[in-house]
Image: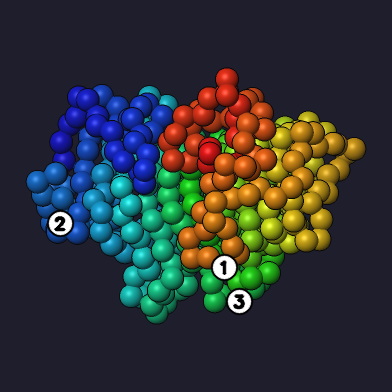
């Protein structure tokens, strides 16, 4: 390990993330490295990196620690429990390190985080080739408070499992361990769960926080699902397609609160080509807002709101994406030059950049969806 006085930026996909107090190493923080040519008997320095994520997880014990994971393939099924602080987060950062099931999996979760003030940035979680043992039903899961899950690619999770109440998700942010304020930003999540299985979600969120700039498609149930103690959430500039539901806003099966999903703001999302569009279920409040969403071609219905709420600024037409089909290996969700999503968004709560880190310019109009044109 070593001590940094000035952290460096890291590339996540096409996005350069400048390190800050919210995501990366703070001044005079401890840094570990993990690489495919490392050894778990090493000290975790850049010159002598660890080999496994599990070894790095054991080394991280205090706030202000950053773990840089080099490109390569690593076994998942890890659990991280150390807590950061508001001034010194714990950050796990990569430029696309690939996490896969071990030959004999002992866990149903690829990455189980229980720590507070933890950032997980820039990983691929690929559950497509399971070995023996437990099948992964959850990709990245955080039960800690003030978590940030950003710029990850999570796919082929909870496929081939029985469709029952055990459930699953690509990314889960949970209040079960009294976690609050989880942010899910700029992730790509797809091929999650058996088709039509109502228990498996793309992004599952049960506390407060934000869900912004994500692309989610081909999910057994909802691309984005709020439940349990979910409230005080902003669901902004996501692109959601080819799933059973686009967005479910609701509360039920409570852990600690029975107020229902209230103060949830759903703005600037593309919800396209699902079975159902945007739906309120369970208990919801009258403080929810639905503004400037493109909601179209959801076969059973586009909208199902409660409490006499109305959606405003809705676009009800084809999004005219660059290259989209339900079955494409890599659909291109960018709006084409003639897309009605261009400039039709609401600037309130809109993130300053899109999923690729390209700046949004409110003066020229905010585009709807995760990508700007």
- The residues tagged by marks 3 and 1 sit, at their Cα atoms, a distance apart of 23 Å
Decide if residue 116 is on the left or right side of residue 277: left
Q: What element does badge 3 sit on?
A: loop
Q: Position of residue 31 (x, y in %)?
A: 22, 38
- The residues tagged by marks 2 and 1 sit, at their Cα atoms, a distance apart of 38 Å
- Identify whether 296 is placed above or below 354: below
Q: What element does badge 1 sit on?
A: loop
Q: Residue at x 16, y 47 (%)?
A: 44
Q: What element does badge 2 sit on?
A: loop
Q: Residue at x 59, y 50 (%)?
A: 321
Mark 3 crowd level (few <14, some 14–19, many ≥20, 10 Å Cα): few
Farthest residue toward the right? 308
Q: Position of residue 61 (x, y in %)?
A: 29, 41
Label drawn at residue 65: none
Whether tag 3 and tag 1 are in contact, CB under 8 A, the answer is no
Q: Which residue is mark 1?
A: 327
Farthest residue toward the front? 338
């Amino acid at each position: 390990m070593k001590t940094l006085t000035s952290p460096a930026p890291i590339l996540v996909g096409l996005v350069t993330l400048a390190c800050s107090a919210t995501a990366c190493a703070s001044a005079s923080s401890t840094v570990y490295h993990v690489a495919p040519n490392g050894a778990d008997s090493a000290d975790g320095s850049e010159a002598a990196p660890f080999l496994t994520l599990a070894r790095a997880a054991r080394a991280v014990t205090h706030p202000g620690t950053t773990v840089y994971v080099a490109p390569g393939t690593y076994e998942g099924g890890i659990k991280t429990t150390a807590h950061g602080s508001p001034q010194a987060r714990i950050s796990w950062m990569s430029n696309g390190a690939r996490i896969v099931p071990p030959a004999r999996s002992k866990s149903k979760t690829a990455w189980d985080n229980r720590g507070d003030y933890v950032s997980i940035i820039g990983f691929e979680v690929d559950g497509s080739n399971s070995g023996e043992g437990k099948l992964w039903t959850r990709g990245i899961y955080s039960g800690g408070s003030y978590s940030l899950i950003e710029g990850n690619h999570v796919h082929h999770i909870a496929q081939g499992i029985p469709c029952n109440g055990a459930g699953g998700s690509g990314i889960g942010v949970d209040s079960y361990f009294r976690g609050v304020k989880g942010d899910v930003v700029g992730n790509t999540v797809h091929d999650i769960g058996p088709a039509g299985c109502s228990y498996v979600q793309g992004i599952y969120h049960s506390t407060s926080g934000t869900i912004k700039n994500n692309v989610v498609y081909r999910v057994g149930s909802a691309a984005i699902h709020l439940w349990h103690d979910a409230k005080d959430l902003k669901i902004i500039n996501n692109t959601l397609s080819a799933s059973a539901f686009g967005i479910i806003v609701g509360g039920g099966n409570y852990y600690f609160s029975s107020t229902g999903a209230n103060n949830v703001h759903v703005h600037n999302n593309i919800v396209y080509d699902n079975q159902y569009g945007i739906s309120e279920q369970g208990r919801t409040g009258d403080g929810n807002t639905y503004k400037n969403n493109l909601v179209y071609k959801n076969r059973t219905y586009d909208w199902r709101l409660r409490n006499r709420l109305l959606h405003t600024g809705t676009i009800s037409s084809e999004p005219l994406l660059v290259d989209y089909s339900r079955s494409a290996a890599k659909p291109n969700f960018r709006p084409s030059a003639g897309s009605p999503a261009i400039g039709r968004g609401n600037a309130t709560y809109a993130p300053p950049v899109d999923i690729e880190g390209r700046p949004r310019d409110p003066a020229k109009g905010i585009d709807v969806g995760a990508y700007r044109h």
